[in-house]
Amino acid sequence: MSPSPTSRPYHHGDLRAALLRSAERTLREKGAGALSLRELARDTGVSHAAPGRHFRDKQALLDALALDGYERLNQALATADAHPDRPLEQRMTALARAYLGFAVENPALLELMFARKHEPDRTAQLAAAVDHSLGSFTRLVADAQERGEIVRGDPERITLVAAASLHGLAALIAGCALDAEEALAGLDEHVHLLLHGLRPR
């Protein structure tokens, strides 16, 4: 007979990660509305009180999920831009591919990440992770401006244009208006148009 949820052993160092994995699975399958600490305890096989040792309430759980998502996204972006000496278009395409790849694999998580990003009560840690994510693109823009590769102007404003374009692709994929494979296959052209504009050359 399997141990009851209250008696099943676990390692305290592993429980938080296990709770986050279970919460992300629920988020992906049922949406954020289905998340609760009580259900999380049941799914993970621990006492009802156990999740409270790591997350004071549902909002803290959502923040932790969003933060975990940003940390994974930021790692993917850092890996994609590991060679800053490459030409601008190659760097931008690599970052775009990393972002869109994350979005395709984690649509529900990305939606939560953006929702928590705009909440006034978000934690300082989450705010820093958000800034770091956009910073990957802002640094690329600033580098390219110094080399005369793109127009001068506020790097953050230019980054916003690029980010909106990429997030628009992610939203079209999430809404089933665009096939993910088709979007990824056409990403080189998308970035080329983004960087060079639509005027005839």
Image (cartoon, rainbow, N blue to C red):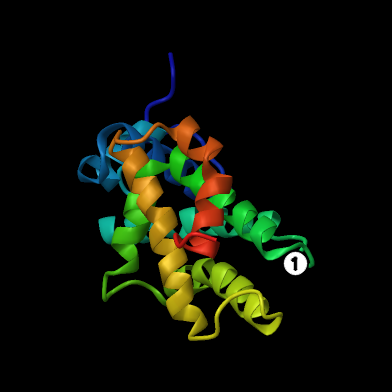
Q: Quadrant of the N terminus?
A: top left
| Above-or-below relation of 103 to 121 | above
- Location of residue 144 by image quarter: bottom right
| Above-or-below relation of 157 to 198 | below
Which secondary structure, mark 1? loop
In front of the other: 107 or 175? 175
Give the residue furthest to the top.
1
Residue 153 at what x, y percent from top left? 50, 86
Left or right of residue 24, residue 72 in this image: right
Q: Residue at x 40, y 31 (%)?
A: 179
Tell me if residue 26 can be seen.
Answer: yes
Q: Residue at x 26, y 76 (%)?
A: 120
| Circle 1 residues within 10 Å: few <14, some 14–19, many ≥20 | few
In front of the other: 127 or 198? 198
Q: How many marks?
A: 1
Q: Residue at x 27, y 55 (%)?
A: 58
In front of the other: 12 or 153? 153
Residue 66 at what x, y percent from top left? 40, 57
Q: Residue at x 28, y 74 (%)?
A: 121
Residue 17 at what x, y percent from top left? 51, 46
Tell me if residue 51 can be seen.
Answer: no
Q: Quadrant of the C terminus?
A: bottom right
Residue that carries the numbered disc 1 in the rendered image: 84
